[in-house]
Amino acid sequence: MHDDMRHSGVTGLTITYRDSDYTLRCVDSLLKEGACHVLVVDNSADGGKTAAELKEIMRHNPAATVLVTDRNVGFARAVNLGLKWLDENFPGRLVCLLNNDARLLDGAIERMRAALQQRPEAAIAFPTVDNDGVATGPLHYNSIFGTIHRKKAACSMPYATGCCMLIDPSKTGIPLFDEDFFLYGEDVELAHRLGPERYVHVPETLVWHAGSASSGFASDTYEFNTVVSHWLLARKLSRSRMEFALYLAGRAVALPARALLRSWRYRSPVPLKAFLAGTRRAIEDMYSAKVERVDG
């Protein structure tokens, strides 16, 4: 199938949650930059409203497809579903994963593809991103405290955000992301699992990103899922019980401090309430995981 598009080695993938306007601009930028086909995974769980809007506008464009999930399955699982669909329908292609509230700038795909070709051991290329005026390249995650830094710091590991990645599925395998993560943190776990040698950074600003357009900074969704992911990363990144205990202790200090600072910054009780709710959920999840290991 798709014989007229066999010349291109790149497909596009984006995940949407009740936001057709941003998503359409994202799809247009992927196609403009040379993606032979773009898959939109609709994670909206809104009775098909968003999917219907997207399908209506894109009905005359055979180079775009909308895949609707039966519920909001989270970002990690939605990406894995999209990669599986693309592998089945466009096998052997690189995949440009792009946040639906982002758009590619001129030459983005070609520069990332060239970077992968120059580094045969690399499986993922990622560019510098303009986060609404702030240039962001590789970030560094402090494993002990669960803090994120723009520069290398002690006890930190580099990672690429999931905002934009050019992925070679033949090297990463499918599924790509750990589906224990619902929203946020899956990119850190992936970097930990693959290792820095599997990434190549293109030090050019090739993507513009609105920044949390779907979830919203200081919103319930953003704050809650961020807290849950930080606690989950303590388990995923630790290599021993001692490390796990250290990472938990670090987060027990850092996460409430983060919530207090963000509540003050945004003049909102949401970050504090989300810290309590997210911590409670994380404890429940850790207990469930322990029970599963015992039962297994």
Image (spheres, rainbow, N blue to C red):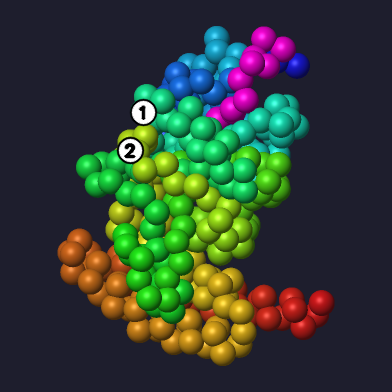
* Quadrant of the snapshot with the N terminus: top right
Between 166 and 249, the residue placed more toward the observer is 166
Q: Amino acid at mark 1?
A: Leu
The answer to whether residue 50 is visible is no
Q: Give the mark nearer the N terminus: 2 vs 1.
A: 1
Image coordinates of residue 71 in percent, x first then y, are 60, 45
* Quadrant of the snapshot with the C terminus: bottom right
At a point 36% along the width and 66% down the height, the residue shown is 152
Image coordinates of residue 251 in percent, x first then y, are 41, 80
Mark 2 lies on residue:
205
Q: Quadrant of residue 169?
A: top right
At a point 56% along the width and 72% down the height, the residue shown is 237
For residue 23, which numbered disc appears in the image? Answer: none
Q: Quadrant of residue 213?
A: top left
Q: Secondary structure at mark 2?
A: strand
Mark 1 lies on residue:
105
**Chain part drawn in magenta:** 3-13
Image coordinates of residue 62 in percent, x first then y, are 60, 14
Q: Amino acid at mark 2?
A: Thr
Outermost residue, front side: 118
Local crowd at mark 2 within 10 Å, few (<14), some, or many (≥20)? Answer: some
Q: What distance separates the C-alpha of mark 2 from that of mark 1?
A: 8 Å
Q: Contact, CB < 8 Å: mark 2 with mark 1? A: yes
At a point 52% along the width and 70% down the height, the residue shown is 233
Between 205 and 250, the residue placed more toward the observer is 205
222 is higher (above) or lower (below) than 214: below
Q: Is residue 26 left or right of residue 34?
A: left
At a point 50% along the width and 61% down the height, the residue shown is 188
295 is higher (above) or lower (below) than 206: below
Q: Secondary structure at mark 1?
A: loop
